[in-house]
Image (spheres, rainbow, N blue to C red):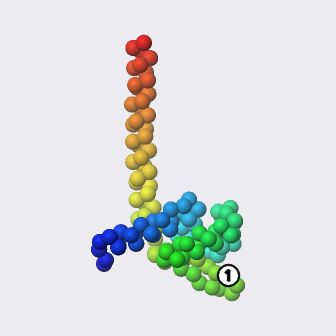
Amino acid sequence: MKRGKERFKERASILKAVAHPLRLEVLEILAEGARNVTDLSRLTGARISALSQHLARMTYAGILGQSKISLHVYYSLRIGSLSGVKDFMESVLTGKTARLKKLARRQNLWVHFQNISH
């Protein structure tokens, strides 16, 4: 496995390729199985032209694979599962939510304290 700055650049490139809400939604859909752009458009509500650009970016990054069946190109994940990535993101979000709630409680107590002292 590569080490050093070049490997970190490659990893960052992959993260950039999925760093969009629509791309993340598409990845979750494709985790259930291969789909064509028409299916993805129907499921996400996104325009086919926009989806095609996002799919191309993720395909170029090596995240998605393509297979042509009749007139349709089907997209699929090149890795077996996204569960580890999804679990990581959900853990971060859960921790962030907990920190924000704690901060809000502190702020509320501070506001309450200020009201009492005046």
Residue at 55%, 72% in the rendered image: 57
Residue at 50%, 68% in the rendered image: 17
Pick out the residue farthest to the front: 5
Q: Image height check: is 70 above or below 13? A: below
Of the 4 image quadrants, the one containing the N terminus is bottom left
Of the 4 image quadrants, the one containing the C terminus is top left
Residue at 45%, 69% in the rendered image: 14
Residue 114 visible in image: yes
Residue at 42%, 60% in the rendered image: 87
| Residue 19 point in image, percent of width and height | 50, 62
Tell which of 29 and 3 is nearer to you: 3
Categorize mark 1 by other alpha carbons within 10 Å: few (<14), some (14-19), many (20+): few
**Amino acid, disc 1:** His
Tell which of 78 and 11 is nearer to you: 11
Tell which of 55 and 101 is nearer to you: 55
| Residue 42 point in image, percent of width and height | 69, 66
Element on which disc 1 rests: strand
| Residue 48 point in image, percent of width and height | 69, 69
Q: Is residue 94 left or right of residue 37?
A: left
Q: Quadrant of residue 9?
A: bottom left
